[in-house]
Image: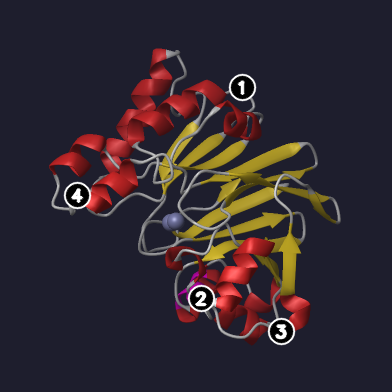
């Protein structure tokens, strides 16, 4: 086992992903309460003190709600871009963070923690400086790609070669359009700096699929504008168009909204 990944929570009500590379353990975002993340880690048999760091994708509340609490309690370093730090600290979004746990990172520049290479890549989303992350360890690659309005060739390049991916399947366009959200919110979600819809995400998955890709987790589903089966079927059908058969060539699962999902290994 090189990598272990598990979504502790995924969706607009809160995101938190556990990632282990060799002996090193991390969390990507904590958009849930300190209590919930500790419980989630407990279910995985992980002592929160063992978490080496938290990687923040962007400063929306569904990604940072519990970041400060966790860091204060367990003395955990937080990695985020300088602009995200300025916003989080300037607007007092996560409370006080100990100086030594403030770890600014640069977009499009790899960071190395022992044998693990972390690459924060630029994404399109209405936050100050949002990033996705790819993690490479022992020639294996895992990518986190959520909260992305649109995926262009440059982003696709960052996703290619992934052995496992957590990819946003936020909404079904028809459900969103027909739903009860106010117009401005619909417009925001559908925009190029909003969220990725099922069809667009499924196309991306089909495009970046390669034989080494073992699994895809569909995540950050909208509670009101999507259903897990619809996201799953959209992905399955898109893959089948290219004769990529789910359960034979790739494992596809949907991350659970507010419970710990199954653990994925590479
Ligand atoms: Zn967001
Ligand atoms: Zn989000």
Q: Which residue does the numbered mark 3 point to in the structure image?
A: 98
Relative vertical location of residue 234 with respect to residue 34 in this rendering, above or below: above
Q: Which residue does the numbered mark 2 point to in the structure image?
A: 66
Q: Residues within 10 Å of mark 1 (few under 14, many from 20)?
A: few
Question: Mark 2 or mark 3, which is nearer the start of the sequence?
Answer: 2
Q: Is residue 67 magenta?
A: no
The number of callouts visible is 4
- Toward the viewer: 162 or 65? 65
Label 1 secondary element = loop
Q: For the residues labelled 1 and 3, say whether their Cβ atoms are less than 8 Å apart.
A: no
The Cα atoms of the two marked residues, 3 and 4, are separated by 41 Å
The Cα atoms of the two marked residues, 1 and 2, are separated by 37 Å
Location of residue 102 in the rendering, given as x and y in whole percent from the top left corner:
72, 74
Label 3 secondary element = loop
Q: Which residue does the numbered mark 4 point to in the structure image?
A: 183
Q: For the residues labelled 3 and 4, say whether their Cβ atoms are less than 8 Å apart.
A: no
Question: Mark 4 or mark 3, which is nearer the start of the sequence?
Answer: 3
The Cα atoms of the two marked residues, 4 and 2, are separated by 30 Å
Mark closer to the observer (3, 4): 4
Relative vertical location of residue 81 with respect to residue 230 in this rendering, above or below: below
Mark closer to the observer (1, 4): 4
- Toward the viewer: 248 or 166? 166
Which residue occupies 48% across, 23% down? 206
Label 2 secondary element = loop
Which residue occupies 74% across, 54% down? 106
Q: Residues within 10 Å of mark 4 (few under 14, many from 20)?
A: few
Which residue occupies 48% across, 28% down? 204
The Cα atoms of the two marked residues, 1 and 3, are separated by 44 Å
């Amino acid at each position: 086992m090189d990598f272990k990944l598990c979504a502790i929570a995924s969706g607009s009500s809160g995101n938190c992903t556990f990632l282990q590379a060799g002996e090193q353990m991390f969390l990507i975002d904590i958009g849930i309460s300190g209590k919930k993340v500790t419980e989630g880690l407990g279910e995985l048999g992980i002592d929160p003190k063992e978490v080496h760091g938290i990687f923040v994708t962007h400063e929306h509340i569904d990604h940072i709600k519990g970041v400060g609490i966790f860091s204060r309690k367990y003395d955990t370093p937080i990695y985020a871009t300088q602009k995200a730090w300025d916003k989080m600290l300037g607007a007092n979004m996560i409370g006080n963070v100990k100086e030594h746990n403030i770890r600014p990172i640069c977009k499009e520049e790899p960071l190395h923690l022992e044998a693990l290479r972390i690459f924060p890549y630029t994404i399109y989303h209405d936050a100050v400086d949002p990033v996705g992350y790819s993690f490479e360890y022992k020639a294996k690659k895992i990518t986190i790609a959520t909260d992305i309005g649109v995926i262009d060739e440059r982003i696709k390049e960052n996703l290619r070669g992934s052995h496992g991916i957590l990819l946003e399947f936020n909404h079904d366009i028809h459900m969103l359009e027909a739903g009860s959200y106010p117009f401005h919110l619909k417009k925001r979600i559908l925009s190029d700096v909003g969220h990725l819809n099922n069809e667009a995400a499924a196309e991306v998955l089909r495009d970046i699929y390669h034989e080494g890709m073992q699994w895809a987790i569909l995540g950050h589903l909208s509670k009101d504008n999507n259903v897990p089966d619809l996201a799953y079927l959209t992905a399955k059908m898109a893959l089948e168009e290219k004769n990529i058969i789910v359960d034979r060539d790739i494992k596809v699962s949907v991350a659970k909204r507010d419970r710990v999902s199954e653990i994925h290994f590479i």
